[in-house]
Image (spheres, helix red, strand yellow):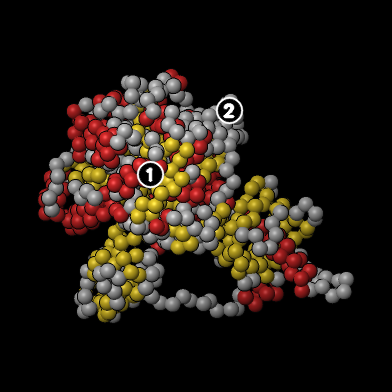
Amino acid sequence: MFKKILIANRGEIACRVIKTARKMGIATVAVHSDADAKALHVQMADEAVHIGPPPANQSYIVIDRIMEAIKATGAEAVHPGYGFLSENSKFAEALEAEGVAFVGPPKGAIEAMGDKITSKKIAAEAGVSTVPGYMGLIEDADEAVKISNQIGYPVMIKASAGGGGKGMRIAWTDDEAREGFQSSKNEAANSFGDDRIFIEKFVTQPRHIEIQVLCDKHGGGVYLGERECSIQRRNQKVIEEAPSPFLDAATRQAMGEQAVALAHAVDYASAGTVEFIVDGARNFYFLEMNTRLQVEHPVTELITGVDLVEQMIRVAAGERLAMTQDDVTLTGWAMESRLYAEDPYRGFLPSIGRLTRYRPPAERAAGPLLDTGKWQGEATAGETAVRNDTGVYEGGEISMYYDPMIAKLCTWGPDRLTAIEEMRIALDSFEVEGIGHNIPFLSAVMDHPRFVSGEITTAFIAEEYPDGFEGVAIPDEDVPRVAAACAAMHRVAEIRRTRVTGRMGNHERHVGEDWVVSFQGRDLETRISADRQGATVSVDGKSHRVESAWTPGQPLAVLQVDGTPLVLKVGKSTGGFRIRHRGADVRVFVRSPRQADLARLMPEKLPPDTSRMLLCPMPGLVVKIDVEVGQEVQEGQALCTVEAMKMENILRAERKAVVSKVNAAPGDSLAVDDVILEFE
């Protein structure tokens, strides 16, 4: 077995690999750019080597820099994680030339399957069903439009070397095909150094289901079930689960056997993923094979008890798989939510800055061990687990140079509904401040009836949130429980204030029992009767029992209301609290009956009018301005392009207008809410 491994990556996946290497007694080497000098993976590793400036194309994807780090540290093997050099055959070749083991598949398998065009041709030759498309290289936008018409709209424009949703566009018209081709080409060149593009038919009402395979160098191979990855935004996976709520045993077996056969066809050896589109009749079509570890691998680990990183390392060291297909069992259900530094209220655009507060929920194991260990006996009803794979820490910075992922939050339970409920509580308990993040959106999805039912497709987000995410309200059935909790917390805060400011001799100012809790347009009359264990709160005549150890100033309130958990993020607000719960973000007022009567007479303060301005929705770099002063623009017309976190974002006109002023130019670096354009 290896004595020292270098991880040619950063962030949470580097931390993930380090955990398993440490468990195996293997020393680790981290590499880092200037921007990552204080990153968590650098702190966790046994050694760290600086490899260059912040841009990935000057550090993390420069093969020579990685090779120098290997030589300097004497690393015997390299785990590439995902992204960066993980599917770069030239990197695998360079390692082989130096006698360094690549913790991944052979160079030939990377070349065969890592390129989407080549992999589809091989799959077709192997008898695998593939989606109709044009597998040749496309020279320009005119040819892209011609091919799109031949295939028939809608089409998917994809980067041949792409991954992680980058370099992908869906086009429904000639204009979108032309525009999408150029954007995909630019993103592919910037992210992968390869701007080749291909086009395929976009299958409507599809599910994205992938099979995890694991093969050794001795002809052994197994599949470890499937992952449902249909909850996507801009082709970027957001929520994954294992197993899929849609597959039956026969389809699972057929997909798994086909995936393993394809892996054997290219002499694959390592962990890999074969992705399929599955239609409503459970017909499945090969999309691509990812010749690396997937972001969503934890959910497979949680239902199988197999540490995929450990298996990759053992295969790279020449060991045979210690399992056969008969040894693989799927136990329980696992959910994964990807926490991104992006603002869901601004079209999910990237957010950068310092994490002023970062407190994940406590990890715990039940059934599967924490950090992908082995099963300890059988999982029993009521057992649940929480796992958080992360590469950041409180006080650290989210950089504009890399992927905006903060963490991968996973829950496990004996069944799907339990796993969902555990994810709801875990998301409510996850404290992230200082940047925009997508926790409210993830929470909203977990409560969405269509998601809970399992009736989902890759169009779920587009169909259910066609105008973007504008927040959600606390469900009507939860309003009385939240009101009771807020009234009880207000009473605790009032008692604290009387002890600090209201003491007169041995007497304290009386804290009232009657309060009006107001939020979401409702005024709820409450009466509190407190005791040493908690309080009984009457809300509009119905009693609720509230118990909690919350004290004023704590940003997280973990309560029991009527015997069931209620987790609230609590912020300061004049006359009450800012409460965040299950994706809702509301201001709650707690007033005396007299104060509530007077508050109803107060006029509402309206926000400033910015309808005649185009504001920059995230920090980024202006790539181009598409309009000029005096030009009339139409609804949906492209106004400018801003690049952030390796993604090009086209900002469009919301309505017909005339440009009166242009305040930015290509190359300008903008902050959030900087005014780019003004309109008459």
Whether residue 333 is visible here, answered yes or no, is no
**Distance from Cα at disc 2 to Cα at disc 1:** 40 Å
Question: Counting other residues with Cα less than 10 Å from the Cα at mark 1, is it few (<14), some (14-19), or many (20 or more)?
Answer: few
What is the total number of numbered labels drawn onto the structure image? 2
Question: Counting other residues with Cα less than 10 Å from the Cα at mark 2, is it few (<14), some (14-19), or many (20 or more)?
Answer: few
658 or 53, which lies in front?
Answer: 53
In the image, taking residue 53 as reference, residue 322 lies left or right, namely right
186 or 566, which lies in front?
Answer: 186
State the mark number for residue 72.
Answer: 1
Q: Earlier in the sequence, mark 2 or mark 1?
A: 1
Is residue 99 shown above or below 10?
Answer: above
Residue 111: which quarter of the image? top left
The amino acid sitting under disc 1 is Ala
In the image, taking residue 584 as reference, residue 141 lies left or right, namely left
Residue 107: which quarter of the image? top left
Q: Quadrant of the C terminus?
A: bottom left
Q: Which residue is mark 2?
A: 376
